[in-house]
Image (tube, grey):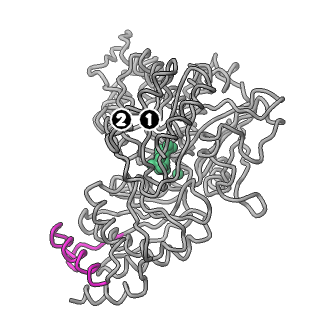
Amino acid sequence: EKQQALLIESASRFPPPQGVKLSYGTSGFRADASILSSTVFRVGILAALRSIKTKSVIGLMITASHNQVSDNGIKIADPTGGMLTQDWEPFADAIANAIDPKDFIQLITEFVKKEDIPIGGVQSAEIYLGRDTRPSGEVLLEAAKQGISSVVGAVAIDMGILTTPQLHWMVRRKNMGMKVSESSYFEQLSNSFRCLVDLIPKEDTVTSKVDEKLIVDGSNGVGGEKLEELKKLVDGLIIEVRNTGKEGEGILNERVGADFVQKEKVAPLGFSSNDVGIRLVSYLHVHTHRQCVLRSLDGDADRLVYFHIPSICNMKIDLVDGDKILSLYSLFIMEQLRALSKKENSGMIADYSVKLGVVQTAYANGASTEYLKQLGLDIVFTPTGVKYLHEKAAEYDIGIYFEANGHGTILFSEHCISWLESRTNEVSSTSKGSEQHKAALRLLAISNLINQAVGDALSGLLLAEAILLHKGWSIKRWATLYQDLPSRQLKVKVADRTAVTTANAETVVVKPSGLQEAINSETAKFPLGRSFIRPSGTEDVIRIYAEASTQEAADTLAESVAEHAK
Ligand code: NG1
Ligand code: ZN
């Protein structure tokens, strides 16, 4: 009764927008920030219910990642730090779109009953709130707080401005019974990075000063700001952050960021031909690049791609995308596993074989898949969207997943971690310092460095850097692991993106009928041709991907497939 009254009263303050249908896509709700207050308020309620139901801390992140600055969005972190369970997505859609307040209340009442959620009981609810640097964040934060406090016994804790992966990391860690703060996040990353660097064989370190400097494109978002803080704790890397989002530096995600760099294959603003030969990085909410190597982060710092500008003559970039990051990680982890299973005289014997798996999507460059196959890896494909990749990767002892756009991470099973721990503890003093011992320590350090809740540009960057230092590789060397097949991505605006449905990890169009046949016949015209279309989960568009033996062929194929999709 009291609960109903509270909901009715608070809901009236946040009327839903008319004439828009919102859906909880691959990354929560996203839309123009001006229409989102009601949605965020309602997701606040959902988060509180989820917290009571799971008896755990739930995270609520206000961000629209690589979308333009006027957009915003909201997504939920489940108790493990992963994305909201898919079972609750229909409820999220239903309450976000309920116009009539009575329907809204009824939806909640029914759901609470169906899920048997003990509101007002002994179980309290705790929700961690985070937001990126978008100006609309503050107003939406307030809406979320009001949604949360309209559920009896629910408490919102504002964790401030954070990257998306930071918030997911905090939720995961809190639910593992550990203390949580931003400084513990930075410490864990920098300590485990140091650990990996200390384990680099000494004779190799001389050669490893290959790229002097790492220049990071912060996408004018939260990632740049956080990297500035993290870099103070990281020895052994010279990091320069550009597009930090400070006054006068430029606009969030406007011609900057990992999404821009990866899709457009051009250098972000703030990078010039003076950066030739540097390692550059770009992240979605952050990018990175290294002197003669660049990298790029994205708007909420959950994506990471590297690039470099090979020639002074033009600003064409050589992109080192998520697939290549995945390949670097896979290669290094395989090497450590191989070292671990070698029987030395140390008595340390690998008594179980670690199941290592790699997860990609249809966007993975065909050359990367070929390369990983040749390494002898087990590769599986899922639909686009981190939740699918993450779920699949969790089936392995060590599961590595990446989307081509730089979103990915590495998951270690509990069993694997305790096995590695026992490997490092049990060894006799004589085998300390053996190759096996070091390999186990490296794998443990990786498990601490990499954000196992969700893809994280900051931790992903440090891992890539540690491996490059270990191998003494420049970005150029890394880029030559394999040569990408030329590819092209296009999108077409459509009135109803749900008109297209797909199967087989989105590689085959099911509806409308006949479309797949048309795509097949276009694709067959090109050597090494591969093409697919799918509805975006985050925008009102159909996305087209094409790959072929030359850039011209990939472009032509993409355009002709796009014609069929219109
Ligand atoms: P959509 O809009 O569903 O293609 C995009 C990315 C996904 C994922 C989500 C969430 C591409 C082609 N798609 O999804 O991989 O990262 O955004 O951010 O890059
Ligand atoms: Zn993002």
Q: Looking at the image, is 55 positioned above or below residue 105?
A: above
Foreground pick, 194 / 375: 375
* 3D distance between C-alphas at marks 1 and 2: 7 Å
Position of residue 556 measured from the top left corner of the image (x, y, whole percent)? 58, 30
Q: According to the image, label 2 marks what residue?
A: 508
Number of marks present in the image shown:
2
Which stretch is magenta?
101-126
Q: According to the image, label 1 marks what residue?
A: 532
Asked if marks 1 and 2 touch (Cβ < 8 Å), the reply is yes
Q: Mark 1 Cα within 10 Å, few/some/many (few <14, many 20+)? A: many
Q: Looking at the image, is 396 positioned above or below residue 437?
A: below
Q: From the viewer's perspective, tell me whether residue 425 is left or right of residue 557.
A: left
At x 31%, y 26%, the residue is 355
In magenta segment, residue 9: no
Q: Looking at the image, is 561 positioned above or below residue 208?
A: below
At x 29%, y 81%, the residue is 152
Q: Please name the amino acid that badge 1 sits on.
A: Phe
Foreground pick, 234 / 135: 135
Q: Looking at the image, is 374 positioned above or below residue 128?
A: above
- In the rendered structure, find residue 179 and report the number of the disc placed on it: none
Q: Residue 125 falls in which quadrant of the image?
A: bottom left
Badge 2 element: strand
Foreground pick, 556 / 238: 556
In magenta segment, residue 113: yes
